[in-house]
Image (cartoon, helix red, strand yellow):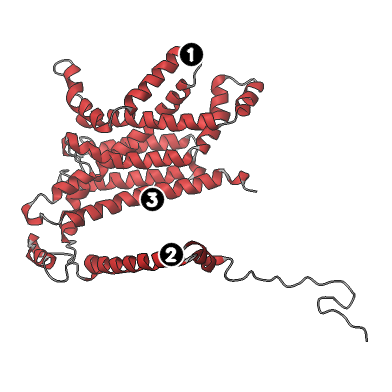
């Protein structure tokens, strides 16, 4: 009887060997921990010390925020909250959120009409979600934006369809933040593209004008532009003409965001290989055809991370309008704890507001990562 190897079939054809798994310490979570956190005695010691402090303060935060917290008080009676703050086991007083959440979200908007700004916030969020889906990237999306923005204006102002009129001075809270961010970035982005193209134009007058705009706007802080829009700009208007304060702040935000976004877009245009420009010209395309169909799509794909980083920064910078008396989300939160009964509970309010900002900013960040991966999928080897 002939000897047949274990990995050879009876017919003499070799069988496929069973796949072997890599050692547990070279791949997977264990290998990552060993390489990044426990690679030496110094790294191990630092990891253990930091882990101790993280666990310790995490437990303390859970005790403060959940275990010992007070969630409601009757009729603004905050004595229990104040006693808890000075007790050996202090806790959060989330009752300030349950009592003041309407004011924080909607400012001084008429209380009985709060359903209107609430619907506005839902419409804005739904608009963001629909716009993020690539299957809706058609010309109909522009119609959806126009109709939704008209509906938002009708809901906020009123005066038609049986809705009571609410002047802009009564607006506040989250709708103001969403209005400033949405309109600011929606108008600033096309402006930034035009300015970025103008800076690379062969016409000296246009190039100098775009450079002057970018350098002038980027040379001053946003607070200065808001002050100029709120205080100095009305001085140059004819007597009897007054432009709404929110509109003036919106224009300042648009101009400021446009200058920064223009530099991001210009970076993408310069990073594109020169061969792309030459290939587009070889096809006989006009300047706008070449720019719209070949150059801009590739340039914007290259700068998705810095673009979204700028979007997130300006979404948070809308809180600076508090210096000109506009009740955005942060200003409404600060004003909510001015009442003597709730003074001293600002930490809870700021945590709640930071959660709202985090939700919107984190959603933009995750979406940009997924979009970048999807658009660059053809480059993966």
Between the C-alphas of marks 2 and 3, the distance is: 34 Å
- N-terminal of the pair, mark 3 or mark 1, is 1
Residue at image point 37% right, 19% down:
212
Between the C-alphas of marks 2 and 1, the distance is: 60 Å
Q: Residue 92 occupies which quadrant of the picture? A: bottom left
Label number found at residue 118: none
Tell me, yes or no, whether the two marked residues, 2 and 3, touch with CB atoms within 8 Å. Answer: no
In terms of depth relative to the viewer, which is nearer, 268 or 327? Answer: 268
Q: Which residue is mark 2?
A: 42
Answer with left or right where residue 29 lies relative to residue 146.
right
The answer to whether residue 140 shows anywhere in this view is: yes
Mark 3 or 1: in front is 1
The answer to whether residue 242 shows anywhere in this view is: no
Q: Which residue is mark 1?
A: 203
Q: Position of residue 264 (x, y in %)?
A: 44, 33
Other residues around mark 2 within 10 Å, as few (<14) / some (14–19) / many (≥20): few
Residue at image point 65% right, 26% down:
279
Q: Position of residue 379 (x, y in %)?
A: 62, 44
Residue sticking out furthest to the bottom: 1
Tell me, yes or no, whether the two marked residues, 3 and 1, touch with CB atoms within 8 Å. Answer: no
- N-terminal of the pair, mark 2 or mark 3, is 2
In terms of depth relative to the viewer, which is nearer, 214 or 234? Answer: 214
Residue at image point 26% right, 65% down:
61
Q: Which residue is mark 3?
A: 362
Q: Residue 62 occupies which quadrant of the picture? A: bottom left
Secondary structure type for disc 1: loop
Up-down relation of residue 15 to residue 240 (above or below): below
Quadrant showing the N terminus: bottom right
Other residues around mark 1 within 10 Å, as few (<14) / some (14–19) / many (≥20): few
Q: Position of residue 179 (x, y in %)?
A: 29, 38
In terms of depth relative to the viewer, which is nearer, 235 or 73? Answer: 235
């Amino acid at each position: 009887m002939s000897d047949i190897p274990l990995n050879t079939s009876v017919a003499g054809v070799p069988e496929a060997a069973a796949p072997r798994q890599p050692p547990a310490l070279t791949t997977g979570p264990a290998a990552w921990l060993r390489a990044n956190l426990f690679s030496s005695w110094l790294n191990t010691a630092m990891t253990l010390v930091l882990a101790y402090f993280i666990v310790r303060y995490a437990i303390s935060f859970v005790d403060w925020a959940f275990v010992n917290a007070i969630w409601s008080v009757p009729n603004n009676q905050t004595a229990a909250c104040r006693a808890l703050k000075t007790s050996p086991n202090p806790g959060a007083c989330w009752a300030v959120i349950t009592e003041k959440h309407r004011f924080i979200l909607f400012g001084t908007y008429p209380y009985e009409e709060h359903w209107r700004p609430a619907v506005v916030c839902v419409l804005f969020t739904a608009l963001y979600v629909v716009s993020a889906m690539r299957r809706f990237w058609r010309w109909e999306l522009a119609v959806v934006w126009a109709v939704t923005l008209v509906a938002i204006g009708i809901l906020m102002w009123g005066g038609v369809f049986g809705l009571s009129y609410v002047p802009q001075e009564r607006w506040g809270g989250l709708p103001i933040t969403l209005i400033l961010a949405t309109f600011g970035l929606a108008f600033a982005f096309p402006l930034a593209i035009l300015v970025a193209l103008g800076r690379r134009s062969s016409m000296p007058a246009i190039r100098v004008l775009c450079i002057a705009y970018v350098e002038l706007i980027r040379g001053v802080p946003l607070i200065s532009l808001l002050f100029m829009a709120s205080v100095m700009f009305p001085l140059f208007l004819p007597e009897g003409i007054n432009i709404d304060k929110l509109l003036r702040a919106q224009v300042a935000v648009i101009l400021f965001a446009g200058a920064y976004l223009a530099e991001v877009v210009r970076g993408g245009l310069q990073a594109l290989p020169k061969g792309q420009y030459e290939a587009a010209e070889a096809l006989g395309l006009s300047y706008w055809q070449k720019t719209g169909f070949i150059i801009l799509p590739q340039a914007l794909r290259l700068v998705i991370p810095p673009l979204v980083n700028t979007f997130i920064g300006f979404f948070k910078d809308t809180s600076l309008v508090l210096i000109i008396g506009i009740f955005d989300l942060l200003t409404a939160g600060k004003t909510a704890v001015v009442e003597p009964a709730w003074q001293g509970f600002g930490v809870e309010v700021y945590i709640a507001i930071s959660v709202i900002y985090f939700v919107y900013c984190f959603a933009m960040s995750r979406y940009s990562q997924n979009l970048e991966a999807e658009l660059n999928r053809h480059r993966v080897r």
